[in-house]
């Protein structure tokens, strides 16, 4: 069992790596690089200043790991290591020193059109781009993470303490985040800041923000909370004190420093709505529950009364649902829900705080999966009716209801559990259209938006997340099967 699980985990990680790598290669080798600026309004604004435009474009390519870029100031600082007398002045002496450095380090020297100042670029080969992506994927916070020359006496430690601001927590100094582990009333109640995923920097939409923050950061309006600070003052603020990050000495606000009593004065805001991944998860998990609540009783009823009007009616309904294209299904049921139930046809109309905003998308997501699950489970139930154990149960005098409850459904629970991974994967694919049509701010809607705007880092980040969910949902299905039926062994013969 243990050997099987570890083997599946390793294969799952390999699958995630292969799918993400393939997506990365396709995007960075086949999508024209110039397309990333099609949706960027800054390009139009900077056309009148070719030097700023070149600097802007090269910085963007550098953030997306297409190139390594040194502007004039950075280039001169690098060349000075070999030629201390070099300056930014455009002359033959400086040009020779700069070109010698470029030839030695594999850079190409160019000049801005207007100022004629030098800058350097180096094309990153695909393997190096991938190496940077995976090399920076997992970031561990530690007491030696911060290097601030203006704060040489920064203490470095990790300790559990009853913090005056947030209560009992693992507190760090020299770390990027003040609170490494903390507790509060928000699910899942125990939180951490010592391990973060770095999926790159978003561009051109959400420009400059980490991809993980775009997908995993909360949305909506700011929420005000009253805190009592270590200096004894009370303040109503939207600052998320749990995510206090180190602020360099030269950028610290004196008032904030006095209020917190340490160098961790950089904070994000607490927002009211779930993150993109939280929105998709919330709608998806309830849709999955609704799918099974509707499908299983319906399939059992159809199988129990096979060939009768109940079965024929159910088969007709399911056939129609299967025949209707997903896009038409979503639009049709969005209209019906709006007309009959009075729920909004667009998620932002009332927002995430209102229950009715979730009704339409969640029911549509569930409805997309119902027909396939009913047909599959009905067929399985009918097959079980002719099994020897059913005949034996009838011979013992059990009625049909008892047979279905005590025998058939118990055995049928195995394929029900086995089908959960497929349902999860189906919900992911269905969420792309559903969230787009309902304008729901989730991961599904973000994927086509990112493709349209050529936001390559977001596309790769979403593929990574979708693949991870899909792969580990299959492993979860296997583990759940062993839980409902201990006779199933997830190991080959001879394994421990």
Image: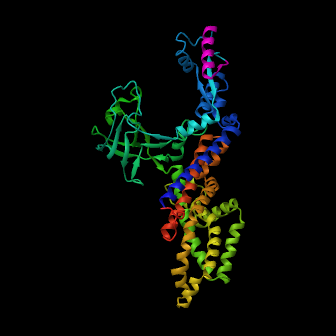
Q: Where 335 falls versus 222 (above or below)?
A: below
**Looking at the rendering, which quadrant does residue 122 occupy?**
top right
Inspect this view and state whether residue 318 appears: yes
Magenta highlight: main SS: helix
Q: Where 37 falls versus 224 (above or below)?
A: above
Q: Which residues are magenta?
A: 92-113
**Tag count:** 0
Coordinates of residue 453 in the picture (x, y in percent): 65, 41
Coordinates of residue 189 in the picture (x, y in percent): 39, 53
**Looking at the rendering, which quadrant does residue 177 occupy?**
top left
Coordinates of residue 323 in the picture (x, y in percent): 72, 67
Give the residue at x 34% y 44%.
170
| Front-most of residues 299 and 21 | 21
In the rendered image, residue 256 lying in the magenta stretch gets the answer no
Q: Is residue 249 left or right of residue 138?
A: left
Give the residue at x 43% y 47%.
223
Q: Where 35 falls versus 388 (above or below)?
A: above
Inspect this view and state whether residue 442 appears: no
Colour treatment of the image: rainbow
| Front-most of residues 109 and 57 | 109
Give the residue at x 59% y 62%.
423
Coordinates of residue 468 in the picture (x, y in percent): 56, 52
Give the residue at x 61% y 50%.
445
| Front-most of residues 4 and 253 | 4
In the rendered image, residue 111 lying in the magenta stretch gets the answer yes
Q: Where 475 falls versus 322 (above or below)?
A: above
Q: Residue furthest front?
A: 494
Q: Residue furthest left?
A: 232
Q: Is residue 167 left or right of residue 460?
A: left
């Amino acid at each position: 069992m243990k050997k099987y699980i570890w083997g599946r985990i390793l294969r799952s990680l390999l699958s995630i790596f292969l799918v993400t790598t393939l997506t990365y290669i396709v995007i960075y080798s086949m999508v024209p690089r110039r397309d990333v600026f099609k949706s960027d309004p800054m390009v139009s604004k900077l056309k009148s200043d070719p030097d700023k435009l070149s600097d802007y474009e090269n910085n963007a390519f550098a953030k997306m790991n297409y190139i390594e870029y040194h502007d004039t100031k950075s280039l001169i600082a690098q060349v000075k290591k070999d030629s201390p007398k070099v300056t930014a002045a455009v002359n033959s002496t400086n040009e020779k020193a700069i070109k010698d450095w470029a030839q030695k380090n594999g850079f190409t020297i160019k000049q801005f059109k207007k100022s004629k100042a030098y800058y350097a670029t180096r094309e990153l080969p695909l393997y190096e781009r991938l190496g940077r992506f995976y090399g920076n994927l997992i970031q561990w916070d530690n007491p030696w993470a911060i290097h601030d020359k203006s704060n040489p006496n920064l203490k470095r430690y990790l300790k559990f303490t009853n913090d005056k601001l947030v209560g009992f927590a693992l507190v760090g100094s020299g770390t990027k985040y003040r609170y490494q582990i903390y507790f509060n009333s928000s699910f899942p109640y125990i939180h951490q800041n010592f391990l973060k995923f770095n999926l790159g920097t978003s561009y051109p939409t959400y420009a400059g923000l980490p991809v993980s923050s775009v997908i995993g950061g909360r949305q909506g309006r700011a929420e005000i909370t009253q805190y009592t600070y270590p200096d004894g003052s009370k303040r109503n603020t939207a600052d998320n004190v749990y995510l206090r990050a180190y602020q360099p000495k030269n950028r610290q606000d004196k008032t904030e420093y006095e209020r917190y009593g340490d160098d961790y004065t950089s904070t994000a805001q607490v927002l009211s709505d779930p993150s993109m991944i939280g929105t998709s998860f919330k709608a998806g998990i309830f849709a999955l529950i609704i799918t099974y609540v509707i499908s299983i009783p319906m399939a059992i009823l159809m199988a129990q009364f096979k060939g009768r009007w109940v079965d024929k009616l159910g088969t007709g309904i399911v056939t129609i649902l299967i025949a209707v294209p997903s896009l038409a299904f979503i639009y049709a049921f969005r209209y019906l829900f709006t007309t009959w139930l009075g729920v909004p046809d667009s998620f932002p109309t009332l927002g995430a705080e209102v229950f009715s905003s979730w009704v339409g998308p969640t029911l549509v997501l569930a409805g997309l999966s119902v027909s396939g699950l009913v047909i599959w489970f009905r067929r399985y139930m009918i097959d079980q009716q002719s099994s020897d154990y059913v005949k034996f149960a009838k011979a013992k005098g059990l009625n049909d209801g008892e047979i279905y409850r005590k025998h058939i459904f118990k055995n049928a629970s195995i394929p029900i559990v086995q089908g959960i991974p497929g349902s999860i994967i189906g919900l992911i694919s269905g969420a792309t259209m559903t969230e787009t049509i309902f304008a729901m701010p989730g991961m599904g809607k973000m994927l086509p938006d990112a493709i349209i705007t050529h936001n390559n880092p977001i596309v790769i980040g979403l593929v990574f997340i979708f693949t991870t969910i899909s792969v580990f949902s299959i492993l979860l299905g296997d583990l759940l099967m062993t839980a409902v039926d201990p006779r199933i062994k997830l190991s080959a013969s001879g394994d421990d």
